[in-house]
Image (cartoon, grey):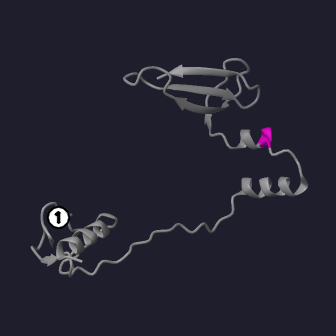
Amino acid sequence: MSAKAESLQTYDKLKASADFCLECGDLLNLPVYSEHLECPKCGFKISLLDYPFEEIVTQKVFTEKKIWLEKYNEKVKRGMDIDIEEEDKKNSKPTIDYECPKCGHSKSYYSAMQMRSADEGQTIIYECVKCGFTSSLNS
């Protein structure tokens, strides 16, 4: 394999990960027309063929079980319908101190949506915790 082909193959590896200067640790820029990496901070220069490339792997480890997932799995085991219960939906909504115009209850669920054009404010939708009456406010 020619040196140019090896350099291009090495360049492909470089595009896939973040690589750092061996001298100062700064992030290295990808070379556009060069077969060398040059650090913008300290000036360290190295050939692409000599750079010790390492594969970078990131992962997320989930350590906490989700309550909704446990309920789902339990329903699957029992052969029950998989619909989320209405009470679960209600408990998952955020609440705010907002008086219901219909019954006067002081707590409401709320959500915000962009219902009008992007240069106008959002619409806030309130749902009474007690009677379920829905009202909206354009902010």
Q: Looking at the magenta stretch, what is its main secondary structure?
A: loop
Dividing the picture into quadrants, the one containing residue 31 is bottom left
Q: Position of residue 35 (x, y in %)?
A: 15, 70
Indicate yes or no whether the magenta region holds residue 12. Answer: no
Query: Seen from this angle, which residue lies furthest left?
Result: 43
Q: Is residue 52 left or right of residue 76?
A: left
Write the residue at 77% across / 43% down. 84
Query: Label 1 sits on what residue type?
Result: Pro
Give the quadrant of the N terminus. Answer: bottom left
Q: Position of residue 38 (x, y in %)?
A: 13, 71
Q: Position of residue 5 (x, y in %)?
A: 22, 71
Dividing the picture into quadrants, the one containing residue 24 is bottom left
Residue interval drawn in magenta: 83-87
Q: Is residue 110 left or right of residue 71?
A: left
Q: Could you say which is closer to the camera, residue 88 or residue 78?
A: 78
Query: Seen from this angle, which residue lies furthest top?
Result: 102
Which SS class for mark 1?
A: loop
Res 26 seen here: no
Write the residue at 69% across / 63% down. 65
In this rendering, the answer to whether 34 lies above or below 130 is below
Say which residue label 1 marks. Answer: 31
Q: Could you say which is closer to the camera, residue 108 or residue 112?
A: 112
**Callout 1: few (<14), some (14-19), or many (20+) C-alpha neighbours within 10 Å?**
some
Q: Is residue 56 left or right of residue 32?
A: right
Write the residue at 23% across / 79% down. 51
Q: Is residue 17 left or right of residue 20?
A: right
Q: Position of residue 126 (x, y in %)?
A: 62, 27
Q: Could you say which is closer to the camera, residue 31 or residue 107?
A: 31
